[in-house]
Image (tube, rainbow, N blue to C red):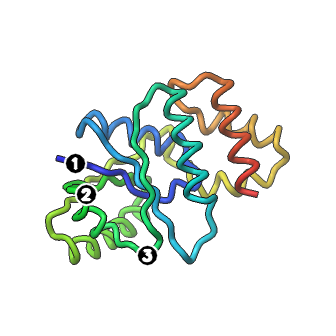
Amino acid sequence: MKAIYAGSFNPLHAGHIDILKRAIKLFGDVTLVLAVNPGKTYISAERRKETYEWLFKEIGMNVKIEILSAYKFLADYCSENGVTHIVKGLRNGTDLDSEMEQEWYTKGLNPNVETVYFTTDNTHRFLSSSSIKAFAKMDKAGFINYMMKVNRIEGAKDTVVKTYLDWVWRNVQ
């Protein structure tokens, strides 16, 4: 079995990392695939990849990260790379509806890939990349102090989390 955890992760947060850790327990290795939607504005995929590789190294996770072309279907990526499972995280019913729709399209192109859903741990249930971007409109010190409380990355030293949050604050403006 070969699994990927696909999403925009713009920015990556503690909830994503928790899902990734749990998926690794189930599948062994899991590749994080950074997706790009041409209709949205993102921190560049290359910058996200570089920063997330640094973060994973700092917290002792050996995670391969790949970038999915903005014009490539996830189903095609799975076919080309021998991927059998796609990991997705669910916070609520809205996420489930959205992810099931994506699964339907993926299955239409590649019936051999299965989507596996992990429900979000309650400590991260309301954490989202969108909310982090909204809070990043605060002054930097306020943002970092608040995020240190609600976006606590398990296993990471405070200095690492602060450095990462500083990067997030600078890049989502």
Residue density around tag 1, few if under 14, some if 14–19, many if 20 or more, within 10 Å: some
- What residue is shown with label 1? 2
Q: CA distance from mark 3 to mark 2?
A: 16 Å
Residue 109 against residue 64 in the figure, above or below: below
Among numbered discs 3 and 2, the one appearing first in the sequence: 3
Query: Residue 55 at x, y = what percent?
Result: 55, 35
SS at circle 3: loop
Asked if the residue under mark 1 is in contact with the one under mark 2, i.e. CB atoms within 8 Å, the reply is: yes
- What residue is shown with label 3? 71
What kind of residue is marked 1?
A: Lys
What kind of residue is marked 3?
A: Tyr
Q: CA distance from mark 2 to mark 1?
A: 9 Å
SS at circle 2: helix
Q: In the depicted view, which residue is nearer to us: 18 or 45?
A: 45
- Between circles 2 and 1, the one closer to the viewer is 2
Among numbered discs 2 and 1, the one appearing first in the sequence: 1
What kind of residue is marked 2?
A: Asn
- What residue is shown with label 2? 81
